[in-house]
Amino acid sequence: MDNLLFTNFVNLWGIEKTPGGAMETKMIEGGHNNAMTALEALIIGHSPAAQHLREMIRRVARSNASVMLCGPSGSGKELVARAIHDEGVRSGKPFAAINCGAIPGELIESELFGHEKGSFTGATARRLGHFEASEGGTIFLDEIGDMRFDMQVKLLRVLEDRTIVRVGSSEVRGVDVRVISATHQDLDSAIADGKFREDLFFRLGVVVLQVPSLASRVEDIPALIRHFQRKMPGEAKCRFEDAAMALLMQHRWPGNVRELRNFVERASVLHGGETLGADDVAMLLNPTAAFAPRYAAPISFVPTPTGLEESAAPAAAHGKAPAPGRPIDLKREIETIELEQIHVALDLADGIISEAARLLTLKRTTLIEKMRKYGVHQQAA
C-alpha cells in the first residue's frame, strides 16, 4: 500500500466514561483552562501530529466508509477506532472490538456471524454474532491480518452484500454495521505471499490510517505519563529528574503506549512518591536486567610457560566463565534467558500470545510449546 493516507500523526490518548457509558469532557493536565471536546479528551497530545490526527478522525467520522488502521502493537489502534465511532452518527449505537488473532480459527465464524442451536458440538443454544449484536453501530476487527484465508472470503461477502448467514442456517440476514479493522502486519507482503486477499484489503481499506509508534513522537511522553498518573493517589505518583525524562524519551518503546502505561504502573508500585533518576528509570525499563546473566570482563592474558604471550587467549568473553573442575550448565543458562525473555514479551504484549510470538520472532505454536515447557500460564491467547 504505497498510497497509505494520513501517515504523520500521533496516538496519545485516554478514555474517561461516566457510569452510563457517555464520554466525559476533561481538562488537559497543566494545559488549557477551557473545556475540552470529547475528542480532545480522548486523543491527548499537543504535538502537530496529534492535532492532525484529531482532524483526520473528524473527517473520517462523517462517513460510513470502512477504515483500516495500520501500525505497531500497543500504539492505540482500538482507541482511534473508538474515537471514529464516538465522533460519528453511530455514536449512540453499539461498538464491538474483536481480536481476530485471539479467537481460535474454528470459532471465529460463529463469533462474527452467530450460530444456530445444534450447528456444531457445544452449540446448545442459538447465539447472535458480533455483526448482528452491533446493528447500527461499529465493529472493530483487530489483527485482521491473522484471520484465516477461508474466513477472509466470507468477510468479503459480508462487506459487499451487507448480509450474514449464521453457522448452521441458510437464512440470509441484512446487517447495517460500519467496519473498522487494524493490523500490525505488512499486508503488502501478506498479499504477495498469498496469505491475505487483495480484494478484501481494498474493501476494508477505503481509508487507511497509519498509527505511528510511540518512539516516533516522544515529545508527548510527559503528557501521557501525567494522564496515566491522574487517578493515582498522591503518594503513588513518581516524579522524574530531567536526566530520567531524557532517558525515557530516548527509549525505543517496542511495546509503545501499552509499554509506557505498564512502566508508569511499575514505577508507582516500586517507587511511589519518589523522584526518580536516570538509574532508577533504566532499571524500570528493563525489569529483568538484575537477573539476566552478566557478561564477564575479559580476562587478562596469562604468560604461558614457553613465554609465548601472544598464543594466550581470553578464557571467556561472555557469560559465566567455568571454574577449574566446575563445568557450567549451558542448557540451564540458555533456558533461564529464554524464560526471562518470554515473560518480558508477554508483558509488553499484554498477554496476547500472537503478539508476544511476533516480538520473539517465533511461531505462535512454538511459543505455546515453550510456555508449556516452562509452566508459564497466560489467560489471553
Image: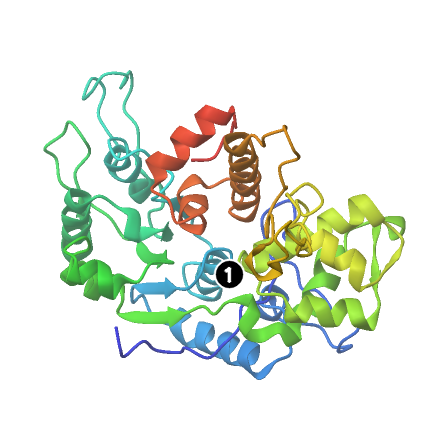
Residue at the extreme left of the image, as rendered: 170
Is residue 148 shown above or below 3? above
Q: Who's the residue at 63% across and 69% down the image?
A: 44
Q: Who's the residue at 31% across and 71% down the image?
A: 207
The percent coordinates of residue 194 (x first, y second) are 14, 55
The percent coordinates of residue 59 (x first, y second) are 41, 77
* Left or right, residue 261 beside residue 339: right
Number of on-image labels: 1
The percent coordinates of residue 82 (x first, y second) are 48, 58
Query: How busy is the neighbourhood of tag 1: few (under 14 within 10 Å), some, or many (20 plus)?
Result: many
Q: Who's the residue at 23% across and 20% down the image?
A: 117
Residue at the extreme front of the image, as rendered: 306
Quadrant (top left, top right, bottom left, bottom right) of the C terminus: top left
Residue 322 seen in render:
yes
* Left or right, residue 192 beside residue 22: left
The percent coordinates of residue 55 (x first, y second) are 49, 79
Which kind of residue does numbered mark 1 sit on?
A: Ser
Which residue is disc 1 drawn over? 75
Task: Place residue 26 in its image quadrant.
Answer: bottom right
Quadrant (top left, top right, bottom left, bottom right) of the N terminus: bottom left
Q: Who's the residue at 30% across and 41% down the image?
A: 132
* Left or right, residue 275 beside residue 65: right
